[in-house]
Image (cartoon, grey):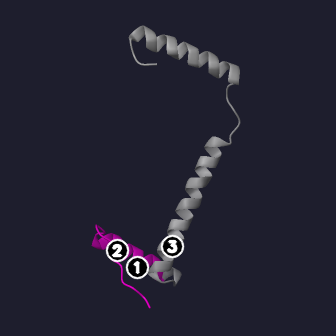
Amino acid sequence: MTTVKTIRNVNEETWRELKTLAAKRRVPLGTLLKNMITEYKKETNNAWDAILNTEKIISDEEAEDLEEITKGMRKEKGWRT
C-alpha cells in the first residue's frame, strides 16, 4: 500500500519543478527523488575519490618538514600546536 509523506519547507515553485521533472521523465515523483538521491551520492563519492586517491603533490619528507615549520610558527605566536 502506498503511504503519503510530507516534505516540509518546500515552496510551491520547487514543488512544481519536481513534479514537472517527474512528468517529463514519465516516472513517479518518488522514483525521481530516489534517482536524484542515488546520483547525488554517486557524485559525492566520486568527488572524494578524486581528492583522496590523487597523486601526491609533495613527498612525505616535504610534508614532515612543513609540519615542523608550522609547529614552530604556531609556537612562536603562542597558538596551540
Q: Position of residue 73 (x, y in %)?
A: 47, 12
- In space, the residues marked 1 and 3 are separated at their CA atoms by 14 Å
Disc on res. 34: 3
Q: Is residue 77 magenta?
A: no
Quarter of the picture containing the N terminus is bottom left
Amino acid type assigned to the residue bearing label 3 in the image: Lys
Q: Position of residue 66 (x, y in %)?
A: 59, 18
Dot 2 corresponds to which residue? Answer: 15
> Are the residues at dot 1 and dot 3 in contact (C-beta closer than 8 Å)?
no
Spot the residue most to the bottom: 1
Disc on res. 19: 1
Instruction: Write the start and end of the magenta stretch as one range.
Output: 1-23
Residue beneath the point at 51% across and 84% down: 26
- In space, the residues marked 3 and 2 are separated at their CA atoms by 15 Å
Q: Earlier in the sequence, mark 3 or mark 2?
A: 2
Q: Is residue 74 above or below residue 5?
A: above
Mark 1 or 3, closer to the camera: 3
Depth check: 44 or 3 in front?
3
